[in-house]
Amino acid sequence: MELLSNTKNGLYCEMADVYIDPWRKVQKALITHGHSDHAKPGHSQYMCHKNSVSILKHRIGKNIKVRGYNFGESISINGVKFSFHPAGHIIGSAQVRVEYKGEIWVVTGDYKLGDDEVCTPFEPIKCHTLITESTFGLPIYKWESPGNVFNQINQWWAENKANKQTSVIYAYSLGKAQRILKHLSKDIDKIYAHASIYNTNKTLIEHGIYDTHCEELSPKTADLNGALIITPQSSTALKNINQTHSIKTAMASGWMATRNTRKNRLIDKGFVLSDHADWDDLLTAIASSEAERVIVTHGYQEAFARYLSELGLKAETYKTAFEGESTLK
Amino acid sequence: MKAISELYIRLEESKNLDKKCDLLVAYFKQTSSEDLLWSMSLLLDKANKRLVPIKTLKEWTLAFTNTPLWLFDQCHPLVKDAAETLALLLPKSVNTTKKPLFDWMNNIEQHKKSSSSEKQTFINHSWNVLSKNERIVFNKLITGNLRFNLSQKLLLKSLSDAFDLAIPSIAHRLLDSFSPLDDSFENWLFKPSAKDVNAKPYPFKPIKKLKLPLEKLGDAKDWIGEYLWEGVQVQWIKRENEIFIWEDNMTLISLIFPELLDAQIFSGANIVLQGTIVLMKEDRVLDYSQIASRLKRKSITKKTLSDFPAKMLINDVLELNGISLSKKPWSVRRKLLNEIYPTLDNKLFLLADVIQDNLWGPFRDAHKDARSINASSILLRPIGSLEKEESPSFLWELDGFSVNAVLLYVESSVDRRSINALTFALWDKNELIPIAKVENHLDDELKREIQLWVRKNTLEKFGPIKSVKPFYVFEITFENIAESRRKKSGLTLKYPTLGKYLKEIKPREAHKLSVLKEMLQKHIK
């Protein structure tokens, strides 16, 4: 029997009878982070990093049974030791370390390397078996330094402002939105967030795990000339903007790395900014885990596992229900 | 390399022409003159800098990056562009270089004759100092795949804005060949040449459409009518034994019509003729789509020349023997045309017959017959009219057609707040076949009504385009109809526009496709 296995409900530890990020309703669920493809509603008991508690309550429901833990704090269930470790993906995101009789597995969840100044940076954890995501597991995905990207965003806003246009950035309401808001230039005097982002921020700020304030976009927001709006991309996202405003739209996502995906979206500009590890960082993370065996999940798992095998690693794939970074989130 | 690469990427990103023009002007102003002539050669897609085929560059990239072929095959379909895929496979760039464009171009030129391994070393070294966007452009350049595809009009406008020059006197510079290796930008753009004056056209004057009844024009005998065909409105200029052809949008299109460039076709001295260039097959004037596709070509093949030869229908003479005729009345200019015409090659030039009578009747008959000879309108000019600022002539268009069609697709605007275009369809048995896409000219109220309705009645989504249930029936008016092999309906409508909303007509009662097919049979004999 393997310590963790891939079941129809999700990743399962039979020894302790707990699931990690299960996509069907279960008793005990360890949650890596608050994105909806990882934190599903309906489980009887949630366990996660302490910074994810308010996020889960905000997104799933106030009355869920959830317990938060510190990074590195050991949780013993039926002789199996579980602990959460920083994944650097979004606020509260964690890798799950599982240890039983000296055998160690690590489930990365979604992760990125480097410090985004919003969440705790990724820490490599040594293990025997690593279950890694592979959203951007192809060598065409190599991120520029985020500092450069934020400069591009700030420059783009300045250009639009000079043309009396409103800048609209499409970003996922949990994660990307907070990261961008944090790094916007101090020169941008009018910043508005769509209600879903504004409310997420409010929760995070109340719990002391985020510190960048901005105003909520409402139908009454009149003065949008030269303003910057941050919103998830949906058909209703812009309905609160007076039709007379000239707007420029942009998307910040890892998918913007190729010209072809930029063209296919209804946007004026693409910024390459991802909360996932790029090709080089995936390889770095795997190497630093010193794992003998690597199991690749959501993303380009087949290609990535094949490449790892050719490098001489023992690599295989799990089919999971996670979506990775979807531009529509 | 940096500036031209940023320009390439940003030109591709910007959708409107004003923005593209701004980008070009900014580029021209910031770039050193040593780099500018090379830039022009690249922007005009004239620089052939191919060092290696893309296949070889792929092998070298895979070797350089240690990428297995199967992994490239996984990536290529996502990126779609081979040169870009190769650029993305390279390790992250850390170094940069200030090497100017002309140095790069000279290096590439020098390596054309190098051995394969020398080329490979040069390319590997180059990648090491280039950024992501620079690598994309560099890869395209050295594999002969870099295309800016900019119109002459846009380049002329940008050059003229950046350097404060008049378009008519610089246009010929874009057509003539030049060598950035031997020439300088200053010489190329600013050095006066006889052509600056010789190529200059007279202003093209827009002609008003006739919206009044004929009788309001006064006496029929004061007017001369003539058929016009669909084609390119041009001025054909021969001065100092050189020929220039200008399109009415101020583009110099001489090279598109090589058959009309031989100075021998008119033995006389300087002359400026105005008229329409059309393409002919046997004795029939072809519809506009044929000539539109020729205008897009970069080079004209012998086959095109022999299959669809061009002819110019002369409407006017603006200059003769170097003397402007703008003070001469139309009756005099027409007489001059009659005298000149026999000295022109009649295989290349046609002079339209005139319609003249004391009564309007024969004018009306000619108007009715126009479609049978594929003419598109009748030009009416007062006998005594001078070539004035505002033309007193009228364009008498043929009567249009209309059908009642069902709304099939709705395309939203980029920001999803409005409707861009509507596609209409006709019935073919129980299926709706699209016949025309028209721009949204709905009034605000109807637009809002349709937007709300679309939300609840969308069948399928294709990006910004939604297919909707058959419900709205509109009148679609159009000027002409032609065959089309590319379209499912087998036909294409010329200038379709949105007519009235036909509230009383049920979708099932809209027209059948067979109605248009009959129309097509009647007009294309």
Image (cartoon, coloured by chain):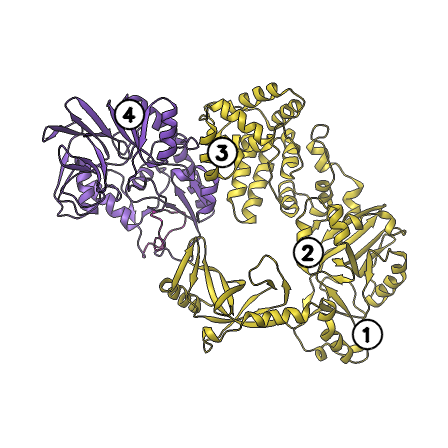
Chain colours: A purple, B yellow
From the viewer's side, name the closer residue of B141 and A135: A135
Q: Is residue A230 magenta?
A: yes
Q: Which residue is mark 3?
A: B85
How far is disc 1 from disc 2 in space, using C-alphas?
Answer: 32 Å
How far is disc 3 from disc 4 in space, using C-alphas?
Answer: 30 Å
Q: Which residue type carries mark 4?
A: Arg
Query: What span is colored magenta in the figure?
Result: A220-237
Element type at marker 2? helix
Q: Which residue is mark 4?
A: A293
Q: Which residue type carries mark 2?
A: Gln
N-terminal of the pair, mark 1 or mark 2, is 2
Q: Which residue type carries mark 3?
A: Thr
Residue A112 visible, this angle: no
From the viewer's side, name the closer residue of B252 and A34: A34
Chain of the residue that carries numbered disc 4 in the rendered image: A
Q: Is residue A34 magenta?
A: no
Q: Quadrant of residue B172?
A: top right
Badge nearest the viewer, 3 or 4: 4
Co-location on one chain, circles 1 and 2: yes
Q: Which residue type carries mark 1?
A: Gln
Which residue corresponds to the image point at 79% horizontal and 68% vertical from the top-left? Answer: B385
How far is disc 1 from disc 4 in space, using C-alphas?
Answer: 93 Å
Element type at marker 1? loop
Q: Is residue A173 left or right of residue B289?
A: left
